[in-house]
Image: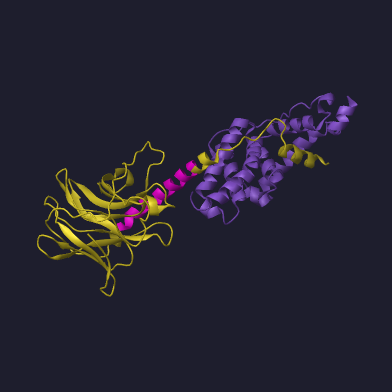
Chain colours: A yellow, B purple
Amino acid sequence: MTQLEELKDAMHSPPDFRPAPMDLQQVMASGGRMRRRRRLLVGGASALTVAALLIGGNQLAGGSTFPTPAAGPSAPLPSAVNSSAPGVLGAVIETGRQAEGRRWILYVETVDPDNLDETLTLILGRTKTGTIDDFRPEIESNDPGAGRMAPGFHAVKAGRLLNGRTTPTFGYYVGDATRITARDATTGKTVEAKRAAWSGFAPTEKAQIFWFDFTEGRPPATLTDLTAYDANGSELHVAG
Amino acid sequence: MARGDDEFIAFAQASSSRLQRAAYLLTGDQHAAEEAAQATLVRVYAAWGRVSRKDPYAYARTVLTNLVTDQWRRPMREYATETMPEPPAAQDVADVVSKRRWLITALRALSPRERAVIVLRHFFDASEAEVARELDLSAGTVKSLNSRALAKLRITAGLVPPLRTETEAGVGQ
């Protein structure tokens, strides 16, 4: 054995060292958090471009509450000290409305970007600066259990007065809708939602975040017959 | 479990011991080696979707080396020693284990850069070009560090009596 071979042999079998068993669950938990933090940074970067993602819709004024066809119980609020704290994923949507100097925004949070079907939560929040550490969640909405990426309406929350602030009716839709409407129960008129494209990391993880416009300080409209239409005007899904 | 977890677990189980040994050679400390290997696997898992289709072991090697040698890039002086450990007395190197122990001790006496080059080149069998890229050094510097480190080890190692097997050592006692 040459001296170099002896050195290699010694390095591969150092006498006073015994490899320790690794806690792979801990490794994967820490690695998952690191992965989510990286994706959160990606989500934060996308917040800068959300204004360009708006894809249409009409205004709606007045009204009260909307029956919630799909929304489940609210998830716990994210906590900075919670090791599994949710991360923002994808585009952050500006509604174009604000209250008390803070803009209403809509965005997605998840504790597991690889399992959106069970973890996607839609947040209505407010922000002053547009940076993630300034997001103040006001309403969290998600469907219970799995199926959150199935075609159709999800996490729909009715508009209401929240601490004196008017919130919009909002939710997300999975599918190729080109128009989402509802009926104002007071006036009988059909109103159209504003929509913004949203996507996760997988090519198939796509949705439209929608909301009905509102006037800050006035009670929101009572909306019914939430309907999605395709490009031909055919109904895709009806909720409420 | 997330997609690809099974593959990551198989990779981690297969590479964990080797990564820990490499970290031990680089740090000289068992506890630090365990921490460095674990931190490496955390980073590999975080990037698993990207690296699993390429060469995850090469990625892990790079991460580990960078974790351990990160302090080089800070503005601090490197206190390399030119004094190699005294070769053990003849009766202490009469078996394989004593010889290995002495070589590891001699390895620790190298400068951090020399040690990293030796570990990458002769433990991981990385090419000079790979070592240069991973340590952010020129190819010439890697060649020079490798030659100098081997020279130090050879010079001292040359003082060690010819190796006998453990059986021979036992018979001889």
What residue appears at the point 55 percent right and 53 percent down from the top-left corner?
Answer: B51
In the rendered structure, the answer to whether residue B60 lies left or right of residue A9 reads: left
For the residue pair B127 and A71, the one nearer the viewer reads as A71
The outermost residue toward the left is: A187
**The quadrant where residue A169 appears:** bottom left
Task: Estimate the x, y position of residue B32 in percent, counting from the top left.
Answer: 59, 32
Q: If the image is split into quadrants, where does the C terminus of chain A sit?
A: bottom left
Q: Is residue B113 above or below residue A118?
A: above
Single out the residue that lies furthest toward the right: B172
Q: Nearer the viewer, residue A49 or A235?
A: A235
Whether residue A123 appears in magenta in the rendering, the answer is: no
SS majority, magenta? helix
- Front residue of B37/B8: it is B8
- In-image side of A158 versus B128 (left or right): left
Q: Residue at x 33, y 50 (%)?
A: A144
Picture quadrant where residue B85 is located: top right
State which region is magenta. A29-50
Provide residue A8's location: percent of width, then percent of height: 75, 41
Q: Quadrant of the N terminus of chain A?
A: top right
Residue A29 visible at all = yes
The residue at 56%/43% (across/down) is B41
